[in-house]
Image (tube, grey):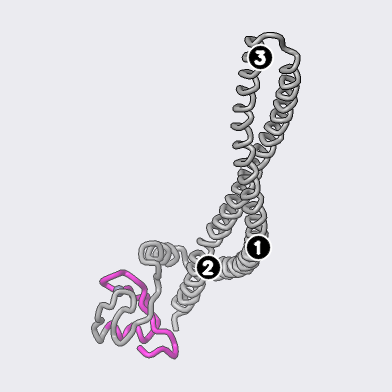
């Protein structure tokens, strides 16, 4: 067997594995990125809910303060009612008390609303905290798994690349250029014949060509696709 053909077959096998690794690796960083974005969005949502809760709590506190002030004012004015001398003063004070009381009713309504709202938000936060903890645990596990896979793949890739570098030292520049050109265009540059056809493009080969390929001592290209045709020892061809 022509040594050059043997080297080219080995080179094709290395490149096939490198292609596979490239394809597998392609989606790993995107998968990790997707998980990280999801975790980020869970976190942001939780933070937003927390801020809304804090705003409501502040408003509730301020409303309670205002209501207490108003209660004080009402009491003060009610005490003054006993001290006034004229109907006009009495009416004016009664009006003021009514105004304060109706403002208080609005405040009390808002207080009730806020108390309900705070209860709901606290529940939401408790649930999302639980969910995000579970989610982040899953994310970490997935990320570790992906990282491990990626490291293994990197190691294998390095190994193949160094094998490739060694191997191509045995292959002449002219053949290597031809091989690389076909590889780029066709993805596989060296293909076995299969049942009398080129297994790259399925073109039927004539008996003379098949015979020459079977001798494995010449560099024969498929006249249809340009791939280098070989027989792989042990293959059915
Ligand atoms: Zn072909």
Under circle 1, the secondary element is helix
Rendered position, 205 above or below 226: below
Question: Residue, x 39% and y 84% (percent of image)?
Answer: 231
Locate ligand 1 by image quadrant.
Answer: bottom left
Bounds of the magenta span?
Answer: 209-237
Residue 66: percent from left, percent from top? 70, 28
Residue at which label 1 appears? 134
Between disc 3 and disc 2, the foreground one is 3
Between disc 1 and disc 2, the foreground one is 1
Given residues 23 and 64, the one toward you in this image is 64
Q: What numbered label is drawn on residue 228?
A: none
Question: Residue, x 28% and y 78% (percent of image)?
Answer: 202
Residue 99: percent from left, percent from top? 61, 22
Residue at which label 3 appears? 90
Sequence-wise first label, 3 or 2 = 2
Q: Quadrant of the N terminus?
A: bottom left
């Amino acid at each position: 067997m022509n040594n050059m053909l043997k080297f080219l077959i080995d080179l094709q096998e290395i490149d096939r594995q490198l292609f596979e690794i490239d394809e597998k690796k392609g989606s790993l960083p995107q998968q990790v990125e997707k998980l990280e974005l999801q975790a980020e969005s869970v976190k942001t949502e939780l933070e937003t809910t927390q801020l809304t809760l804090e705003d409501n709590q502040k408003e509730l506190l301020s409303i309670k303060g205002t209501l207490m002030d108003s209660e004080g004012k009402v009491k003060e004015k009610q005490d003054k009612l006993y001290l006034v001398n004229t109907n006009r003063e009495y009416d004016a004070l009664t009006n003021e008390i009514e105004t304060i009381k109706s403002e208080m009713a609005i405040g009390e309504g808002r207080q009730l609303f806020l108390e309900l709202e705070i209860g709901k938000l606290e529940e939401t936060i408790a649930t999302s905290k639980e969910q995000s903890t579970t989610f982040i645990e899953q994310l970490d596990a997935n990320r570790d798994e992906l990282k491990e896979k990626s490291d293994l793949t990197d190691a294998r890739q390095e190994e193949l690349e160094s094998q490739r570098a060694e191997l191509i030292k045995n292959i002449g520049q002219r053949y290597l250029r031809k091989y690389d050109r076909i590889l780029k265009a066709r993805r596989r540059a060296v293909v076995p014949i299969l049942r009398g056809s080129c297994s790259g493009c399925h073109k039927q080969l004539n008996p003379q060509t098949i015979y020459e390929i079977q001798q494995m001592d010449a560099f024969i290209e498929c006249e249809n696709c340009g791939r280098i045709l070989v027989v792989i020892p042990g293959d059915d061809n």
